[in-house]
Amino acid sequence: MESSRYSLAKNVFVDSIDVDDYINLGSSIKAYDQLLSSIEKELKMILIFGSPGTGKSIILNRLYHNHKYQKDLHYFATPITNHKEFLSRLFKIITKKDLPQNTQVNFSMLVDYCRSIRGEREIIILLDEAQMYSKDTMEMIRLLADTRTVKFVVALHKTEDENEDMVAKEHFQSRIWEVIELENGSREDVKTYVHKKLLKKNFFDLANIIKRRHIGLIYKLTKGNYREANKLMFSIFELYEHYDMHDKSKINYKKFSTKFIEMAAIKLGYIDV
Ligand SMILES: Nc1ncnc2c1ncn2[C@@H]1O[C@H](COP(=O)(O)OP(=O)(O)OP(=O)(O)O)[C@@H](O)[C@H]1O
Ligand SMILES: [Mg+2]
């Protein structure tokens, strides 16, 4: 099949939480620095809270990759919703032993064990998508954190339902948590994001023709949310890809197309027609 370089440009904006794709954005730097100083403090738990697509997972991932050799650090990228399996993973991390076959974790013994090694080890466990864990599991996490041998960093996303969010947040806040809140990026962040993404993959010419006014429009449409920015940029380059293969006269290679931004926005439902 014929292909276009826009197919590659499009794929630059596929969601990724790979540490190599990390970009220093105002919002991420602030949260990451806060996270670093939090894990040095005498806290039991740290909460990373924010709307979907604000960069919680990528920050957790970065923390893990930057510190996995210096710290007793463990990362649960996808939640283990099976309670037994979750427990046996914790057992293995804490005791450094596999759970013998056909046995179950004796939770109170695990807690006692944590108490007995307090001060000798500081285990840090990163839990992404914490909204997926059941109440029971969260309660056990709390009990383990109370021993101060295990510190948990949990990422939790805001839901549409504000009441639900408050319940979750209050539940967490009452337990000596530090809350790190992530918000959408600023206009400047969006500019950095779009440009750096393209530059990292050597699309200098494309980065160059995306000007302030285009960024302004992208920012307005996505409200500075990185996942939405990914979707929008992907759709824009999909249009470029299409016309590049089928009707080159529709493309001005020297100027970025505001019209394509708008068409992509309509397709994604950002603009009503
Ligand atoms: N600092 C960053 N550097 C590079 N890319 C980023 C950064 N922050 C966010 N992104 C981009 O935005 C996308 C969304 O970020 P991420 O998956 O971390 O959001 P999230 O807050 O974990 O969302 P959810 O609540 O849905 O899990 C990522 O796939 C990545 O492409
Ligand atoms: Mg996430």
Image (spheres, helix red, strand yellow):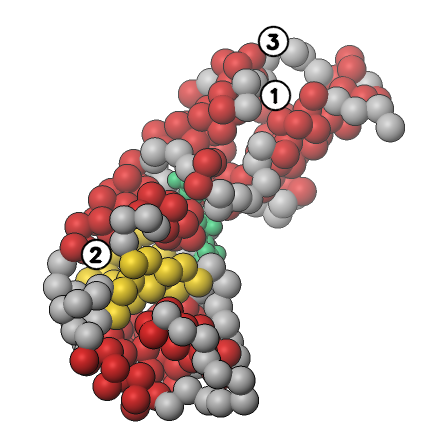
Characterize the local packing of mark 3: few (<14), some (14-19) or many (20 or more) Cα atoms within 10 angstroms.
Answer: few
Specify the label residue 254 is tagged with. Answer: 3
Query: Is any part of residue 193 visible from this angle?
Result: yes
Which dot, 2 or 1, sits closer to the camera?
2
- Return the residue at label 2: 39
Whether residues under marks 2 and 1 lie with C-beta atoms below 8 angstroms apart, the answer is no
Q: Is the residue at mark 1 in contact range of ligand 1, meaning its CB lies under 8 Å from it?
A: no
Spatial separation of the CA atoms under disc 2 and disc 1 = 45 Å
Q: Residue furthest right?
A: 1
- Return the residue at label 1: 257
Percent position of residue 9, x then y: 62, 27
Spatial separation of the CA atoms under disc 2 and disc 3 = 48 Å
**Front one among 232 and 21:** 21
Quadrant, the N terminus = top right
Quadrant, the C terminus = top right
Mark 1 residue type? Ser
- The residue drawn where x is 49% and y is 24% is 200
Element marked by disc 2:
helix
Percent position of residue 83, x then y: 47, 82
Mark 3 residue type? Lys
